[in-house]
Image (spheres, rainbow, N blue to C red):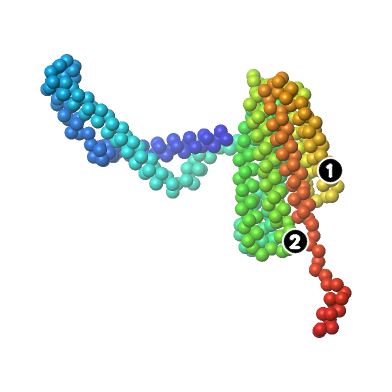
């Protein structure tokens, strides 16, 4: 996002400025070192002496004798050689400077990150989350660590819901601040999902109960879909943003109203799927399927006349519908994954015949 770009610029400025200040006291020695690597002293001295003896370059150029022409050519060749060598010297100076800077500051990435965050802080978000994934808990009790991962997934689901709120607000209000908030939130969502995925994979390498094992894969898949919903939503917001002209979107009014309706339905599916993480309900699961079917029907019906619609505006309504459909399917998948994770293993039971045979052998 734009804040990350500013932070990169801050780090670049700070590192270059500090390195320049450090090298200024020894700039003469540095220049001599570079000059010794590819020296131009002899050619420069010869050119200066020759020009002084002959009364300047203009006088040499006027000399049409064979000796004068040869001297003129020799001076031009040496000047070209000096210019070429100086370019190499400049390249060497930059290469050594940047290599030394990286070698020094690679050990100071934490302080640089701290400085960049202080200078370009995150905008205070109206959304608050509590994500806690204690790594020490994985070794102490993998099952308890899994419970922490479940709570973090609930937090991730709230982020996805909040991202959808920002997308709807941006489409409704056309206020760019909502789009900027969305970019910041997406960075947080991607980081959270990545940390949660690594945490779940680490849990999977330990001995966990059968009940936890049954829910483990479901949570991995659910977290992936929870991330995909706002990611695809951001693609949709970007597509809508590309049509902006003078504070309004170049989208037909009917398409605009349908988009808002579809986004509200997706928000409702995501909300209901997120609730399944905390407390699974078969009734709610049925409602999610019905809402998803409703989205599919609306997308199918509204995509029929997309060619005529595109003649009215440049907005690619068919692409928007495809993105809406993908968001809906990911939202519904969260419910499916959680439902599978709630399925219980059947207890191992012996038939009466086998039980009798075992008892007889005893």
Q: Are marks 1 and 2 in contact (CB under 8 Å)?
A: no
Q: Residues within 10 Å of mark 2 (few under 14, many from 20)?
A: some
In three-dimensional space, the C-alpha distance between marks 1 and 2, rounded to whole angstroms, equals 26 Å
185 vs 295, left or right, is left
- Pinpoint residue 162: horizontal percent, then vertical percent: 70, 38
Residue farthest along the top direction in this orientation: 62
The quarter in which the C terminus is drawn is: bottom right
Helix, strand or loop under label 1: helix
- Pinpoint residue 177: horizontal percent, then vertical percent: 64, 29
- Pinpoint residue 325: horizontal percent, then vertical percent: 74, 37
Q: Name the residue located 38 percent from the left edge and 40 percent from the top edge.
A: 98
Q: Residues within 10 Å of mark 1 (few under 14, many from 20)?
A: some
- Pinpoint residue 115: horizontal percent, then vertical percent: 49, 40
Q: Name the residue located 77 percent from the left edge and 49 percent from the top edge.
A: 336
Residue 52 against residue 88 in the figure, above or below: above
The quarter in which the N terminus is drawn is: top right
Query: Within the image, what quadrant is residue 267 found in?
Result: top right
Asked whether the viewer can see residue 159, the reply is no
Residue of label 1: 287
Residue of label 2: 211
Query: Within the image, what quadrant is residue 185 found in?
Result: top right
């Amino acid at each position: 996002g734009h804040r990350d770009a500013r932070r990169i610029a801050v780090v670049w400025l700070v590192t270059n400025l500090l390195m320049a200040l450090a090298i200024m006291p020894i700039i003469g020695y540095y220049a001599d070192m570079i000059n010794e690597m590819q020296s131009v002293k002899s050619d420069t001295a010869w050119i200066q002496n020759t020009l002084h003896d002959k009364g300047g370059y203009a006088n040499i150029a006027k000399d049409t004798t064979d000796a004068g022409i040869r001297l003129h050519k020799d001076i031009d060749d040496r000047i070209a050689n000096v210019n070429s060598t100086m370019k190499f010297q400049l390249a060497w100076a930059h290469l050594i400077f940047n290599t030394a800077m990286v070698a020094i500051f690679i050990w100071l990435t934490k302080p640089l990150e701290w400085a960049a965050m202080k200078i370009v802080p995150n905008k205070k978000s109206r959304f608050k989350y509590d994500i806690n994934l204690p790594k020490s808990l994985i070794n102490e009790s993998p099952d308890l660590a899994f419970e922490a991962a479940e709570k973090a997934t609930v937090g991730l689901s709230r982020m996805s819901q909040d991202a959808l709120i920002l997308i709807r607000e941006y489409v409704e209000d056309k206020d760019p601040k909502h789009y900027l908030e969305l970019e910041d939130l997406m960075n947080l969502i991607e980081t959270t999902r990545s940390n949660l995925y690594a945490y779940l994979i680490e849990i999977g390498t330990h001995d966990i109960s059968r009940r936890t094992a049954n829910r483990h894969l479901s949570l991995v898949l659910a977290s992936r879909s929870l991330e995909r919903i706002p990611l695809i939503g951001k693609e949709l917001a970007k597509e809508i943003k590309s049509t902006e002209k003078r504070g309004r979107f170049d989208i037909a009014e009917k398409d605009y109203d349908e988009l808002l309706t579809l986004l509200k339905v997706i928000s409702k599916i995501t909300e209901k799927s997120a609730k399944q993480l905390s407390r699974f309900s078969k009734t709610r699961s049925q409602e999610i399927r019905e809402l998803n079917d409703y989205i599919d029907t609306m997308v199918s019906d509204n995509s029929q006349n997309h060619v005529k619609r595109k003649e009215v505006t440049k907005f690619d309504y068919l692409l928007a519908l495809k993105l809406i459909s993908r968001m809906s399917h990911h939202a519904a998948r969260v419910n499916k994954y959680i439902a599978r994770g709630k399925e219980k293993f059947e207890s191992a039971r012996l038939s009466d015949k086998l039980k009798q045979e075992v008892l007889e052998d005893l």
